[in-house]
Amino acid sequence: MERSVSNPPLPPPLAEFLAARPWLTTRAELPGDPVGMLGDQESALFQLLARDVFAGRGAIVDAGSFLGRSASCFATGLRRNPAFRAERDRVHCFDKFRVNGPDTVRFLRDRLKLGACVGDSTRPIFDAQVAPVSELLVVHAGDFHATVWDGGPIEILMVDIAKLPTLLGRLVEQMFPQLIPGHSLVVHQDYHHPWLPHIHVVMEYLAESFELLVPQVDDSALFRCIAPVPPDRLLRASAYDFTKTERIDLMAAAIARLPQEQRHSVAEAQVLQLAWLGETTAARKAFAELDALAQSPGASRHWLSQHRAVADHLEDRELAALMAAHEWPAALARVDASLERRGPGAKLLAHRGRALLELGRTAEALVAVRAAATSPDFAGTQSGDPEFWVLEARAQAAHGDRSAARASLGRAQSCGLGSTRREELARRLRLDDAPPSAPQSAAASGD
């Protein structure tokens, strides 16, 4: 979106900071070196913004504090800032402090050697990691959807909490009106992740109010608020009230705003948005263009990892469509091709078991389901899913093991399967007290 007027001049400290680009040559110095998902340059950027740019005109908001690394960066930088006033300045930390998915389960296992399940609290880890700077923090724990910001103007706003359009909408509604035009900075830490295209759509829609200062620092992008957000635009952005065409066009404009060499990760977000909007052909075409780029020798390992994850997601969507259409031979062929490319994972093995079961190949189905349950990623992906245990019960019942099938239905219920559906499944799978019968066909017990 082109602006009709020039941007306001940069404040001198910010202009000097941007010209020097110190995050490229400085490493954040943090007591205890707290663990987090920030890159080295992002960590330095956050610390240096609080140390060298913060002027005490508003709060520092750390929206999405996770395990505390970003909060530590801001707090240690703030403590070293000549403008810091202990009676006035704090870093406001927002997070639900819960393990929110398989990626977090794997991160805690790999980085901290902790066994965690989805839903577990991460607050004790956060408190331990930020202990050296805790006096500079105000912690707001809970669902961000219910957040009400009453802390006055915001000078630095770090956004790592906008994992859903509704979460971004709450942040826009509550915090964007408190930004200081010409002065406040917004860091979108997920800007170069492919999974959150709503961030790019919203920021491009609000381009009249935000100047893109630094397109990429690790996965972050740095913006400056240059004008108040008009009320009508604030309302639409917070409601994520955009048509399919608007979302596609705004994403294309967001990509065009970036330097050529920094477009590929946001282009991955465009691929996913197209797929989620039902534009499968366009998504595949856009992905093919990126796939050609991925073959170049200069492609970074980080982006290649993202690219492979997007490829996996597209495959999973296509597989899900085949399964929803009950095209079981094609689904089995697709899942076998995915297993060959990606290796055995619990979710893919479970899909293989489902396809085999529907094809009446019950012995093979049970082998696949058992392999899923012993896969290294089972705890983080499938163990809490009641539908996995329903699948196992169906495979066991089809193979004649009614006792095991009853136990699996019990586990499904403990993971959230409703009592009514459990009773219905028990009847359909003949898991009553009658004498065992011959193994059923999958078709007789299928969903």
Image (cartoon, rainbow, N blue to C red):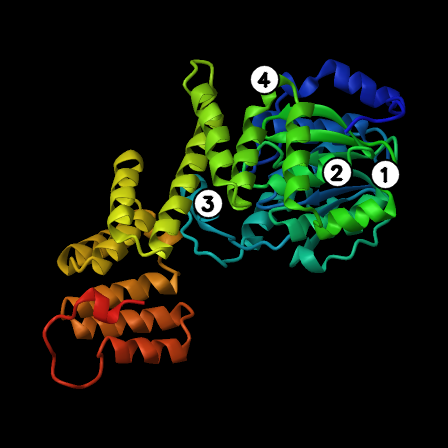
Precedes in sequence: disc 3 or disc 1: 1
- For the point 66% across and 24% down, the residue is 256
Residue 406 as seen in the image, left or right of residue 131? left
Q: Which mark is residue 85?
A: 1
Q: Amino acid at mark 1?
A: Arg
Q: Say what secondary structure mark 2 lies in.
A: helix
Q: Amino acid at mark 2?
A: Tyr
Residue to which mark 2 is pinned: 205
Precedes in sequence: disc 2 or disc 3: 3
User: What is the CA distance from the residue labelled 4 to the residue labelled 1?
Assistant: 41 Å
Q: Say what secondary structure mark 3 lies in.
A: helix
The location of residue 149, given as percent across then percent down, is 79, 53
From this view, report whether residue 34 is shown above or below residue 419.
Answer: above
User: What is the CA distance from the residue labelled 2 to the residue labelled 3?
Assistant: 30 Å
User: What is the CA distance from the residue labelled 2 to the residue labelled 1?
Assistant: 36 Å
Precedes in sequence: disc 2 or disc 1: 1
Q: Amino acid at mark 3?
A: Asp
- For the point 68% across and 29% down, the residue is 253
Precedes in sequence: disc 4 or disc 1: 1
User: What is the CA distance from the residue labelled 3 to the residue labelled 4?
Assistant: 28 Å
Residue to which mark 4 is pinned: 261
